[in-house]
Amino acid sequence: MIDFKHVKKFYPNGTVALDGVDLHIDDGEFVFIVGHSGAGKTTMTKLLLREEAVSSGSLIVGNYNLTKIKNREIPYYRRELGVVFQDFRLFPNKTVYENVAFAMQVVGTPRSMIKRRVPAILSTVNLADKIKCFPRELSGGEQQRVALARALANNPKIIVADEPTGNIDPKMSIEIMNLLMKINKLGKTIIVVTHEKNLVDYYKQRVVMLGDGKIIEDRVGGMFE
Amino acid sequence: MRKHYSLRYFTKQAMTGLWRNGVMSVASVAVLMSCLVVLGCFALLLININVNLENVAQLNQIVVYCEYDLDADAIEEIGSQIEEMDYIDSVTHVTKEDALETLREQSGEYEALYNDITPENNPLSDSFEIIYKGTDETEVFDLEAQLRSIEGVRKINSVYQVAKTLDGLKNGVMLVCVWFLAILFVVSIFVIINTIKLAVYSRRSEISVMRYVGATNWFITLPFILEGVLIGVFASLIGFAIETYIYNYVEKMALADLQMISVLGYGKIAIPLFFGFLVIGVITGIIGSVASLRKYLKS
Ligand SMILES: Nc1ncnc2c1ncn2[C@@H]1O[C@H](COP(=O)(O)OP(=O)(O)OP(=O)(O)O)[C@@H](O)[C@H]1O
Ligand SMILES: [Mg+2]
């Protein structure tokens, strides 16, 4: 459950990035967030990741009230979230396996569990045969699937993807979106920020449109307008 | 769930970090090591001054030298005046013949030089060796002044003066030492801060991913703190080796050339010195890395 209540976000330079957002997302939902450049989409993901704090209003994600969360709780909160960026952010000198295992290592997962889980996750994203490859040996779509696998590594309840298909060609984009749909079917909440009208129109999911920091439309099965 | 953070993981990260910024790491170790060696030299100097001070202070001795051409009566008069004074424990009259004999004995192979000296042309004078009881400074000065004012006394040699000089030297050394060290440690911490900052910078993408997947701050920072610890350990090990070399060299020199100075054997000092170096080195390393990780440790 994600609950934005009258959320405002001001950056230190005075920019009003979000100007009173009210948004409720239930567990297991699939939501597209769309809007023009500078509308505040990335700012919303930053608030969800608690990379930035809300300026006013309240934001509750699952059991965590992000307006009141203590600094030392943030890492534990983040384990409930998986995040995917436009630019993949993989380690070029680590193999596919190591890239995914890294996310588990740094939260203290036992080695035996890592060994079992990484191949399973990689087959979820259809990359079982690339387990020993380095990122440079993969296509953009494949790299993004590794990033998705890493986001899934700690079994989060929510996946946040900020323009996950921004850097890959349309055919590969479909593949990524299909995967996100599949993961959604497995019970995870999916939030996808995107610019791509075709994709949004094709999948007929809930679409939240932001404009100048406000929600200007929120429709299930919506189209990009 | 039990956590499986392995020490091996952290140590490997820390070593890799040091290796990757080789020049800065070497600089940090070198500067910190220099600090420790200088600190060690001062500490050992102070310890040895103290040892010598103790030896000197135990003597409680003043030697009073008479004028050269006094007759036996006048000398005896001086002796009895001394005996009447306060604080006096014992007075020994050393005639100029005794003194000559002692010199002759001490001269060893050069004894022949004294063959021409007869009681008539003995260039020495009679003296009184006094052991006193007072330990209070004013009492000692008082006594010294009284002795000086006796008619027929040429000069007095107070060990207390030597002790005072050594004590003054000790304070001087201490003062120089404190300032010098303060500056050196500030420099070391500064260099370590920059080394760790570089290490953090070269791993910034890794750190950002760690934060996104929920690594705790201590997990993220521990390798860097360990890097500071390693800098401290390396600096103290090398510093200790150098200090050992220096001390043994100085000890040999002091024993050969300056026989009146007693030098504490290195065996007694080595272990405390080693742990002192290690503790100070490691603490400095930790201060440096924590200072450069402040922002990560906070948020
Ligand atoms: N760190 C920041 N400091 C100051 N202003 C910022 C910062 N990040 C974003 N902004 C501003 O906040 C507003 C919203 O930015 P945001 O990145 O959320 O937009 P967006 O919808 O993701 O745009 P795009 O589609 O271009 O990615 C913009 O006006 C932007 O300039
Ligand atoms: Mg954006």
Image: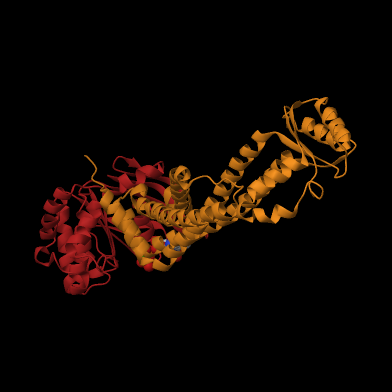
Chain colours: A red, B orange
Q: Position of residue B133 (x, y in %)?
A: 72, 27
> Residue B125: which quarter of the image?
top right
> Where B160 sits versus A175, above or below?
above
**Total number of numbered labels?**
0
Name which residue lies at 31% across and 45% down: A77
Residue in the image at 39% along x and 58% along y: A43
Q: Looking at the picture, does residue A109 appear above or below residue B246?
A: above
Estimate the x, y position of residue A38 in percent, counting from the top left.
40, 65
Locate the N terminus of chain A and report the quarter of the image it occupies: top left
- Horizontally, is B229 left or right of B291 in the view? left
Nearer to us in this view, A80 or B54: B54
Residue sitting nearer the eye, B104 or A13: B104
Q: Image point 81% across, 32% down: which residue?
A: B143
Q: Residue furthest right?
A: B151
User: Could you say which is closer to the camera, residue B190 or residue B251?
Assistant: B251
Residue B204: x, y in percent? 37, 62
Image point (18%, 74%), residue name: A137
